[in-house]
Image: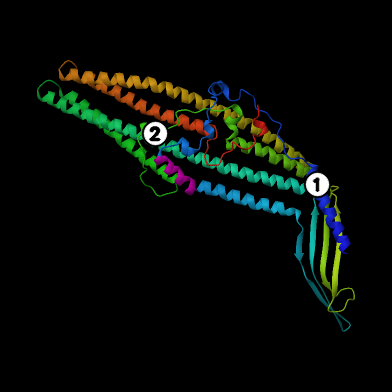
Amino acid sequence: MKRIARQLVIGAVLLNLTGCGLYSKYESQSRVASDVYGVNALSMQSQGMASIGEIGWRDFFKDPFLQALIDTALVHNTDIKTARIRILQAESTLQAARLAYLPSVTFAPQGSISSFDGNVTKAYNIGATLQLPIDVFGNITSAKRRTQVLKAIAEEQEHLVKMQIVANVAQAYSKLQLLDSQLQIMRRTLDIWHQSLDMQRAMMDNGRAYSTSVNQMEASCLGVETQIIDIENSINSIEDAINLLLCRAPQSVSRKAQNTYPLPEQWGTGVPALMLINRPDVRIAERGIEAAHYSIASARAAFYPNLTLNGTLGWSNADGVVNPGKLLASAAASLIQPLFAQGKLKANLKNAKLDKEAAINQMEYTILKAGNEVNRALEDCQNAQRKTKVISRQVAALQKACDGTRELMRNGKATYIEVLTAQEALLNAQLSQAAITHDSTQSLIALYVALGGGVTEKTYTNLPIPHSLIC
């Protein structure tokens, strides 16, 4: 009996090894067009400079207040916690898939008692039953590999959620800084206009101005006060949004002024392949094709026989054996070959192939979308830099004009309308300057996200680049 059992185990091991080699691992054959990133992205590649997508968020966002907010969000945000739970579930499923090669053992004691013509018969079986699946055609192996891919997808999805949380916090923080700048500008403007209003009232008292001019100036002041209330309300709204991302009670958000928000002065976009290697959505799409590949392998394996080794070991008094019973051992092999399954096997294989085709299409779209986002973000960065230089000169010129007009009014050579017009022009220019500074920050954050962003301390630079990213 021991000899037979040894032979069965050796045969099972050999068959399992054969099954592992029936289907090779996934190897992508897709390629990325060299111009998928657009002219801008290719023209802004920099040699000898780290890609912006490889910079960790702590190095990219150096504002200590923003770092503290991101740290809190990464720890307490519920979306990140949910993504982590998905990873733990995938790990549990993978562990079960790895154990599928091992035999299953069940303990099922049985007993019976019968009486016939006054004779009572008692019988029992006490033993354990063992079942060992033989993965001849790689069904178990394909299922295990697909489960490994699903776990990798869950990890990439966690990375994607973290990247989105970091970007959302940084963008909201930048919006707060914009509102702070606008609030300061409006308050300074209100102070100046109050001074002008006092001057108009004094001139009216001296007979040098009419009451209509005083009323118009007063109405302008009230209009600025209304805008200040709206900005303060917007600040409270953004702070509430940030606190929700951080999963904490409503409270004030500490921050620096807009002009002190530090960002990297030098950065490169990297070579085309590396421009997308850090993007979790691209890696998820690649993994989707891989998972579909193993689904096809499992669907094909379903056409072939399933071989299972069965064994029983225990004690029994059945078949005429008297108590206390004797040792019972048996071994058998069963083979199940599907012959007619109502077309389900063919349908499953066809659907698996269609799933892979859909995954390939999704991969192509994801790459094109990623390239478009990179190109769009680069264009926004370039335009913001150009507009920043222009608006700075405009504000300086209007400041001089406003100061000069106010001096002329004091000397009686300009009217309040001219002063009001100059002040409104300066106000609009200063507000535009704050908005452009905000747009510049937002475009750089968008570029950081478009290139994958080093959201966590973990980096992918040492990992092999998927074949689909090789140009």
Secondary structure under badge 1? helix
- In the image as oriented, which residue stretches furthest toward the front? 48
On the image, numbered disc 2 is attached to which residue? 261
Question: Is 434 situated above or below 81?
Answer: above
The location of residue 242, given as percent across then percent down, is 42, 42
Between 216 and 242, the residue placed more toward the observer is 242
Is residue 76 one of those drawn in magenta?
yes
Front one among 467 and 289: 467
Residue type pointed to by label 2: Tyr
Q: Dot 1, how many residues are within 10 Å of its Cα: few (below 14), some (14-19), or many (20+)?
A: many
Magenta part of the chain: 64-77
Q: What residue is shown at x 25% (from left), y 28% (from top)?
A: 220
Is residue 101 shown above or below 252? below
* Applied colour scheme: rainbow
Q: Residue lying farthest left? A: 206
Q: Residue at 15%, 17% (x, y): give it.
A: 412
Kindly tell me whether residue 345 is visible in this rendering: no
Q: Main secondary structure of the magenta part?
A: helix
Counting from the top left corner in percent of width and height, residue 431 is at 34, 27
Residue of label 1: 19
Q: Is residue 398 visible?
A: yes
Q: Residue at x 73, y 43 (%)?
A: 295
Q: Amino acid at mark 1?
A: Gly
Residue with the most extreme bottom position: 118
Instruction: Report helix, strand or loop for mark 2.
Output: loop
Kindly check if marks 1 and 2 are in contact, taking CB atoms under 8 A apart as contact: no
**On the rendered structure, is 340 left or right of 417?**
right
Rendering coords of residue 29 (x, y %): 71, 31
Q: CA distance from mark 1 to mark 2?
A: 59 Å
Q: Is residue 364 left or right of residue 71?
A: right
Q: Which part of the image, by quadrant, shows the N terminus?
A: bottom right
